[in-house]
Structure formats: C-alpha cells, structure tokens
Amino acid sequence: MDKNTVLEISDLHTHFKSKEGTVRAVDGLSLSLYEDEVLGIVGESGCGKSVTAQSILNILPKNGKIVSGQITYFNKGQSQEITSLLPESKEMRSIRGKEISMIFQEPMTSFSPVHTIGNQIVEVVELHRDDATIDARAQAINMLELTGMPNASEIIDAYPHNLSGGMRQRAMIAMALSCHPKILIADEPTTAVDVTIQAQVLSLMLDMRNELNMSVIIITHDLGVVAETTDRVAVMYLGKVMEIATVYELFDSPKHPYTQALINSVPKTSGEITKLVPITGTVPNPYNIPAGCPFHTRCPDFIPGVCDEESPIKTNISADHQVWCFKHADEKKQEN
Amino acid sequence: MRGKKEDRVVVASQWQLIRWKFSRHRMAVVGLIVLVLYYLAAIFSEFISPYDPYEYDEAFAYAPPQVVRFRDDQGKFHLRPFVYPIKKELDKVTWEVLYVEDRTRRLELRLFVRNWEYNFLGVIKSDLHLFGVDKGMLSIMGKDTMGRDLFSRIIFGSRISMTVGLLGIAISFFLGCLIGGISGLKGGVTDTIIQRIIESIRSIPTLPLWMALSLVMPDNWSILKTYFAIIMILSIVGWTGIARVVRGKFMALKSEDFIMAARLDGSGNGRLIFRYMLPSFSSHIIASLTLSIPGMILGETALSFIGLGLQPPAISWGVLLKDAQYVRVLAQSPWMLFPALFIVVSILAFNFVGDGLRDAADPYAKV
Amino acid sequence: MYRFILRRILLMIPTLFALSIISFIIIQAPPGDFVDSYVARLRAQGDYIEEERIESLRAQYSLDDPMMTRYFRWFGGVLRGNFGVSMNYNQAVTSIILDRLPYSFLITLLSLFLVYLIGIPIGILSAVKQYSAWDYIATTVGFIGLGTPGFLLALLMLWILYSLTGNAAIGLFSTEYLGAPWSWGKVVDLINHLWLPASIVAFTGTASLIRTMRANLLDELEKPYVMVARAKGLKNLTLLFKYPFRIAINPIISMIGWTLPGLITGEMLVSLVLGLPTLAPLFLESLRMEDMYLAGGIVFVLTLFTLVGTLVSDILLAVIDIRIREET
C-alpha cells in the first residue's frame, strides 16, 4: 500500500461547553489517513468519533471548539493546516465539499425538505467549480447516475420526501462526491437505512472510492461494517484512540483490553459458538472523564496506581499496529 | 453528587419532575409569586384596602398620589415611612384648584390600623386593615373623579378582573375537552363539522363578536348576572382553542394500547375522555390554559372599557380604566392609568408561568 | 397549484355560510328590535309616537316576518353585496360601511406589514446571536409587548401626545384635507396620520412574531441539514437564508391568517381610544342603537377580511412549501 499521508491529526482536543460543564469530546487524538485507503473509526456512541469528523471540516456546533492540536491536509505536495483557518474563512470553505466531503447519518433530515435534490447538489458544484461554463446540472445528473440512481434526470427534480431511504442515501453520496473530493468522511452512513440497503450503500462507497481515487474515513459503531469495508481501523474510547491496526491484525490479535472486549461482545457469524461477553460497567460521565486511561474503570486488566494516574503512551506492536495501554508498554520499544 | 441526582430523576413522578423543572425557570417562579399576591389581594380586598372603595369625598376629587418617604424636609431619617398630608389651594391667577403637600406635618404609615368596617366573607365583622394612617388622608395611587381611593378600587377590581379569567377558562376547558374530545375520538363527519364550526368562530375577530354578544345582556341585570354573562361570552371564543389542542392530542392517543384496552372494558366516551385520556396530557393542557387566561382578562377589560361590559357600580380594572379614556382626565391625573399597570403585570405573570409550565411539562426537555 | 387554490376556495363556502348564520344570529340576538329601542328612545325624550307609526315602521323593515324568511332575504342580499338598510341612518348599510372600511383596512394592513417588517429581522437576529445583548433586548421588548395590549398603549400615547403638544386629536387627515378631493398630498397626509395608530396596533403582534421567529429559527438551526450545508462550503449568511430561514418562515407565513383577527381587534380598540373615524366607532354606535343590520354587516365584512387573509396565507404557504401542495 502506498503510504502517502493525506490527512494528519495530531493531539487534537475538541471541547463542548454546556450549562452542566465542559465535555472533552475529543481528548488528545492523533491519526493519519493515507492515500487511497479506507480508515474506520469505531467506538461506542459518545466516544467522540462524530466530533472528530466535524473537527476535520471545522463545522462544530456553536458550543464546540477545537482547543488545541493540529489537523493538516496534504494535497499535491502542498500542506494546509486546517486548524489554523478560521471556521468561516474563504480557505476553509473552499476545502469543505471540494477537498474533503462528508456523508451524514440521517439521509432524511440531511436534505432540506423544501428544495429539490438537484438544487442541493447543483449548489455544491456551482460553489466549487473553477470554470463557470461547467454545466453544474449535467454534472449533478452524471453523479447521480454514477451512484446507480435510476432515472437520474428525473430524480434530480424530485423533493427528498419523494425518495426512499436508500435513494436518499445515494443522493447524499452523489452530493458529497459531486466535486470529486480527495477525502470522503462517512459518519454512520448505514445506521439509518434498512439492513438490505446497508450493503448496497457500503459497496457503492467502495466502488466510488475506486472510481474517484480518494481516501475514505468510515465512522461507525458497527464492527461488521468495519470488517467488511476498511483497510485500517482506529478504536476510540472517550475522546482518545486506544488502538490502531490493519483490519486483519485488529480482529486476529487485538491488543487493547477495550478492543478485545468490543470484539467479544459481538456475535460471530462463523466458526464455533462462543458465549457473548458484555463489557462490564457503564461509560463514565462525559463531564467527568476519569484520570489516566479513560477505560480503567471497566478494564479487566486494570493496574492500580498506574492506569488511574498516568496516561498510557503509544506502543508499537508492529509498523501498522499501535496500542495505548500499560499492559503492552514493556513488550515493544516505546515511542514518545 | 451527579449520580445521586440521576437516580432521583429516574424514580420521580411526573409532577415532581415538572416541579423541579418549573422551579429552575426564574421568570416563571417570579410570575407565580406575583399571581399568588394578586389572588391574595382579591380574597382579602377589604383587609388590604385602606379605604372603602365606594366612599367618596368630593373634596379630594383628582387628588394626586402622595410620595411615601423615609427622609423629611430637614433631611432627617425616619424609620417609619410617612407621607405629607395633601391640602387644597386655590391658584390666585387661574382660579384652579391645586393640591399641595403640607410640609409641616407628617402622616405616619402604620400597620394594622382600624378604619372602615366590613364583613369579611359575609361573616366576620371587622375594621382592621393591613395599613393606613391614623388621622388624615392617605393617597397611595391618587383619588378618582369622585375622590374615591384608587388603590382600594384597584384592589377590589382584582376580584372581578382576576377571576373572570379563571372561571372563563374553567368553562372553556370543560367545553373544549368535551367537544374537542368527541371530535378527536369520533373522527369522520362529526370531526369535519366540529372543525368547520371552530374554524368559523375563530375567523371572526374576537372583539366585534364579544361586543355584539354583550348586547344580549339587558341593562337592568345585576352585577353578578352581567359578570357571569361576560364570562360566558368570553368562553364562547375561548373553548375553540382548547378544543383544537385536545383534538390533536386525542387523534394521537386514539391508537394507543391503553385507550383501546379501556374501550374494550366498556368505558363510554365520557369516561374515556375524562378518566383516561385527559390525565395523560394534563400538564400540557394546564400550560395552554394558563397561556389563554390573559386573553380573557383583556377581553373583560376591553369590553368594560368601551362600556359594553360591566358597568359602575361594579369595580373591575376595565371599569376603572374607563375613567381614564378622556384626554383631559389623563392629562390632569395620569395616575388614573395605574389600573393598566396592574393589568400588564398580571398578563406578564400569567405568560411567564404558562411558559414555565409548558417547558416543564415537556417530558423530553432536559432536567 | 390551481387545483389547490380552487379546493381551498371551495372549502371557504361552508365556512362563509356558517358565518352568515352567526352574523344573522348577532343581528337577531338583542332582546327587542330596533323599533322597540327607537320608540323607547323617543319616549325617553318625552316625544309621543302613535301605534300606527310603530306598526308602519315594523312593516317597513319587515320585522314581523318569520326568522327564516328574514335570514334568506338578508343573505340573498349579502350575496349581491346588499347588507340591508341601516335603520339609524336610513341609508344602505353597504354604502355606510364602504365609507369607513378603507381606513380600517389600511390601518390593519399597515400594522400587519409593520409586524412582519420589524418582527422577522429582529427574530432572525436574536436567534442567530442567541444570548447576546441583542437577544436580551429583543426578548425584553417582546415581553413588554406581550403584556401591553394596543389600547393601553394607545391610552399612554394619548397622554404623552397631550402632555407634549396639548393636542391629542390624531384623526385621519389634517384639517386642510378634510373633505378635499383625493390628491397626492392627501394620500401622503393620510399615511402621515396612519403610521402612529398602525404602529400601536402592530406592537403586540410584533412582540409575538419575534418570539415565534426566534424559536422557529433556533429549532431549524439545530437540524442536520444545516451542518450538511456547512460541510458543502456555503457561506454562513447564504446558508442561513437559503435553508433554515426558508423553512422557519413557513409557519410564520401561515400565521398571517390568524394574526388578522387579533390585529382587527387591536385596530378597533385603538381607533376607539384615539377617536379615529374607522369602522370601530360606527360599530359601537350601531350596537348601542340596536341598528343590527349595520352591526351584522360590519361583523360579516370584518370576518370576510380575515377569511381572505387566511386564504392568501394558505396560498402563499403552498407556493413556498411543496409538502403542503402535495398533501391536498
């Protein structure tokens, strides 16, 4: 695999302020996204995976803010530090939708109900086209056809409520890809659609990746989706990455107790019948994240005096496999 | 700490939750306190009013309000508040009657003074009043055209003005639940007809409708009869709003299992409506009831103000404001607008309480 | 679209019919009739009136026909634009109403215009800048407006005007234009006189519109499509007006219809307080005189006004919101 980095996140902290206090939604996250790969970010709801996506595009809600850390976007030898741009600056806006694009969870509410699908797709094309003579409508129809939408030239004038859930998600993908972005972020793209549609949506996304040569980040809580679609996986818990590995290594030899627990809590469709093991305890209150490793309150391998006091540091298991856990700290050579 | 609170929330009853959420709404709590004070004033009008609202004294017609002071002309501070007595003077040039403060004497305000006699609730004879002055004349908010004490009249006016809304809403509530409930339960043609009727009534601007209906009341009716007639008139429009809310809720509730169960048990429509369906959204209804009281208060005020509602000797805020409708009176004695202040405050209070209740009644709002 | 409008107009017919009945009930409601109160008034003045004259008056106004006959005769007339004869003025109700109706309409429409002109931008601003100083000011003004009905405000204005100028007679025209033929100057003069009562009427409505606009827009700003639109790279301002505003405005448009009855009520009270020669004083007088054809006619016309208002706002809503059109 080609190892050109297209997106580099280092030590990202994104906080949300509310009446009850501050939520450290993303709390020191570091990640790299390589060219042409599909990266999965997996974790329970509330672990900060969607916030990570919103941070990349700098489209956080009003009460959210990137407190520290860098997000850098690499394109044709140029690098652009996203975190240094003002959220409403022209440079930031020209990245959104053109360089980095996003697919959202709810295909229904992600479209404005009073505008046609076409209107909302053409808008992106017109916004980012370099040449004003490009026929935005034709490009939109073309994109819809590419996503396998039947009667694309008619659908373009339909309203969101006229379409089925699966068609809406296709339209959503067409909209996100209409400017041929380098990076596509899919935030729970299959959560709100029927199981039968899920597979179609996923394979469509992979087809499009091959077609358009882009990198994809799939954010999901569903290990099945991860196993089927991704090249590499980052496991997140309470705003931090616990483990990153290629998809095979992660499922074959998970290192972090949380990853192991996560995999054990999902039924397997093949092989011997094993007992499902739920993760004990509950996710700690997000207003009050425990000190040290955030998982120590539920961890079966908890080391008192260590895990609840210091933050675990990165341990390289192999070139493509890192884990943040004291249990493995001594096994391999440490890196800062 | 937080965990404890979450446990509490889980086991709390619906009404406890509403109370918690309501008590966080600062304006709503202030509104509630104001309303309690208003209704206390309505109940204990005789005790609170320093003067008999009907007692007139031509000598003090249009006497202005006095300033309640703690510091006298010499700059000396007095712990007990006092006013300077008002005396009449004749302007030597214009021959106009002028009221001036007599700075030589102080009238001390005292609590629990004895003054005019009254029959509290028709049984307890008393002459005890919350406050007043021993000798001389006290004028908190000025005197009216006939020298009657405006503050006492406003306090007595709250009896009618503050109850019109309550009773009106009670009648509207009953009619609205019944008709709205039937409309929502039966559906079909019944629903269509009832909805058409409601729509027709609502498209008539309320004031002309009320004005026209008030003609039904003969001039010789007693205050009490007129009072109830006005409440009926206000309710004729009032029920339609509540019927709409109830119908909407019923439409949604109809398919719920517990309603079906009650129907299978042989509950009639009346029982279904009042025993099963209403309690399930009573908090929502109470909020919208509270929010529709101000409209009724304003309705009575407006009708009495233009002379089609209650007539003197009845005392309501609208009747009191009627005296202020002439520019000359207003210019000479702007304090005649004091009843308006009471109206505005009561309307705001009802709105704040209603807003607070609506937010508190929403089960999905954050605790 | 045309089918929607047609349907909507057809739906108005039963409502109109119901209204005619309500108006007629109003005409019939007071105990006694015009002749009774006319005779009573004459006698109170010490005049003598012969029984024959009374009978001929009753016959003249057909007061002794059965109720149904009178209703259909009246409604038949209404359909042809004839609301009967005012007994007090001895003149066609239609022409009396038409003399004053334009002023009532002008004040009401002008206040409606002001409500939307002021309410929408302030509502948007306080939603977008939630919890800012702006928001607090707008909210406070909104609350004051909520608690201060137009006629109290009119009383206050009256007092302020009188204290400042010694003259509170607002009227609709300056003296030089009274009775003058219509001219550009007269129109300007009329508008100069109308804006004050219209603003007073508009105050309460504006307050509630600000509240609604703010709440609607805040709801919409939370919706996922807003974030989607941001992710496309749209400018915040472009985005605001293309998406959340467009959707938040829908209920506001449909409010036009039911804002009207409140504005008409406000207009009537304010006109009464300020002594403007609109329909309001005429209506009050007709009620006092039991001149019921005039009173009923005024109720009918005012209601027709709100019905047309609702129709217009429904059509507007259907124009801007596809979902409404397809539902029906």
Image: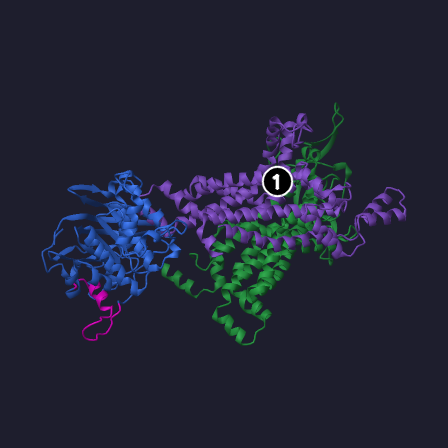
Looking at the picture, how far across and down is residue C61, in whole percent? 79, 48
Q: Does the magenta stretch include residue A274?
A: yes
Point out the residue furthest to the left here: A333
Above or below residue C170? Residue B135 is: below
Compared to residue B214, the image places residue A226 above or below, namely below
Q: Is residue A280 above or below residue C230?
A: below
The x and y percentages for residue B93 are 74, 23
Q: Which residue is drawn at 69% across and 53% down?
A: B230
Residue at coordinates 41% horizontally, 64% vertically from top-left? B10
Q: Note the chain letter of the green one.
A: B
Residue C179 within the magenta-colored segment of the rendering: no
Please state which of residues B47 and B188 is positioned toward the viewer in this rendering: B188
| Residue A290 location, quadrant | bottom left
Q: Which chain is purple?
A: C
What residue is drawn where x is 15% and y is 63%? Answer: A248
Closer to the camera in the image, A93 or A71:
A93
Does residue B58 appear in this view?
Answer: yes
Residue B226, position in %: x, y? Answer: 73, 53
Please give the range of residues in magenta: A254-278
Left or right: residue A173 versus residue C144 is: left
Name the one closer to the observer, B102 or A84.
A84
> Disc 1 marks which residue?
C105
Residue A61 in view, yes or no:
no
> Hue of chain A?
blue
What SS does tag 1 mark?
helix
